[in-house]
């Protein structure tokens, strides 16, 4: 990690702050200078992780898809997949919406493929978290791999609630959870 990485990150933060005009796109309140905030990809990065194509990654990582959000807002947001309606509802400049819509339409088929995959995995689990088995709304479900050794695919996917998804971010913990579920289902 050299100087280049630091410059790229600061440029992403600058683009996100400019796109949002210094206002959190989730709560619509100003981000004050003393508050912690993060860069939000409005069209989620999960799309190019589950539908691995370089052109999707390039579009999702473009400045047009970066926005500023309060850290707390980011932790409490939905995992909703954007639509034209949610993009048009953003309280940002029309020129920012236009650029985001160009990104959206450029990868629309891939967004729909991801949406379909997530919905089918969630439905297969009867709308419940794969680990804690609590009911979760589709908009709150996070798609994760069952086994990190294998590629992301519908067959290697599970939907988790936010809490279990955070725990599953640690590979060793996720493997324990997967193994426990396998033991319980036998």
Image (cartoon, grey):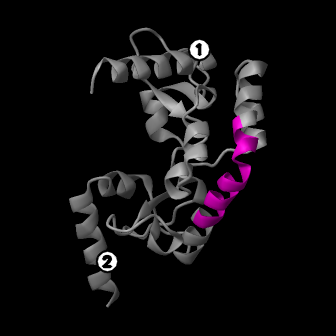
Magenta region, mostly helix, strand or loop?
helix
Q: Residues within 10 Å of mark 2 (few under 14, many from 20)?
A: some
Q: Which mark is residue 103?
A: none
Is 113 covered by the magenta stretch? Answer: yes
Q: Is residue 26 visible?
A: no
Q: For the point 51% across and 75% down, which residue is it? A: 125
* Relative height, residue 120 to residue 102 (above, below): below
Residue 38 in the image: state x and y as whole percent: 44, 26
Helix, strand, or loop for circle 1? helix
Q: Is residue 122 left or right of residue 109?
A: left
* Relative height, residue 178 to residue 112 (above, below): below
Q: Which mark is residue 181?
A: 2
Please tell me which residue lies in front, 185 or 120: 120
Residue 143 in the image: state x and y as whole percent: 48, 59
Q: For the point 45% across and 66% down, which residue is it? A: 129
Residue 174 in the image: state x and y as whole percent: 28, 63
Q: Is residue 112 left or right of residue 118?
A: right
Which quadrant of the view contains residue 43?
A: top right
Sequence-wise, the earlier of marks 2 and 1 is 1
Residue 101 in the image: state x and y as whole percent: 75, 35
Q: Residues within 10 Å of mark 1 (few under 14, many from 20)?
A: some
Q: For the point 26% across and 67% down, which residue is it? A: 175
Quadrant into which the C terminus falls? bottom left
* Relative height, residue 112 to residue 101 (above, below): below
Q: Is residue 171 visible?
A: yes
Is 109 covered by the magenta stretch? Answer: yes
User: Mark 1 highlights which residue?
Assistant: 18
Q: For the point 54% across and 21% down, which residue is it? A: 16
């Amino acid at each position: 990690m050299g100087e280049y990485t630091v410059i790229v990150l600061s440029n992403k933060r600058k683009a996100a702050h400019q796109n949002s005009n210094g206002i959190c796109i989730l709560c619509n309140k100003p981000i004050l200078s003393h508050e912690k905030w993060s860069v939000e990809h409005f069209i989620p990065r999960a799309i190019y992780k589950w539908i691995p194509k370089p052109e999707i990654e390039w579009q999702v990582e473009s400045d047009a898809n970066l926005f500023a959000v309060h850290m707390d807002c980011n932790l409490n947001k939905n995992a909703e997949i954007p639509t034209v309606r949610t993009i048009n509802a953003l309280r940002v400049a029309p020129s920012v919406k236009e650029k985001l819509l160009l990104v959206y339409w450029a990868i629309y088929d891939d967004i729909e493929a991801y949406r379909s995959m997530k919905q089918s995995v969630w439905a297969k689990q009867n709308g419940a978290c794969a680990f804690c088995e609590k009911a979760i709304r589709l908009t709150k479900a996070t798609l994760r791999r069952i086994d990190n050794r294998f590629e992301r695919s519908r067959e290697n996917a599970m939907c988790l609630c936010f809490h279990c998804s955070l725990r599953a971010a640690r590979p060793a913990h996720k493997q324990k959870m997967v193994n426990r579920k396998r033991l319980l289902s036998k």
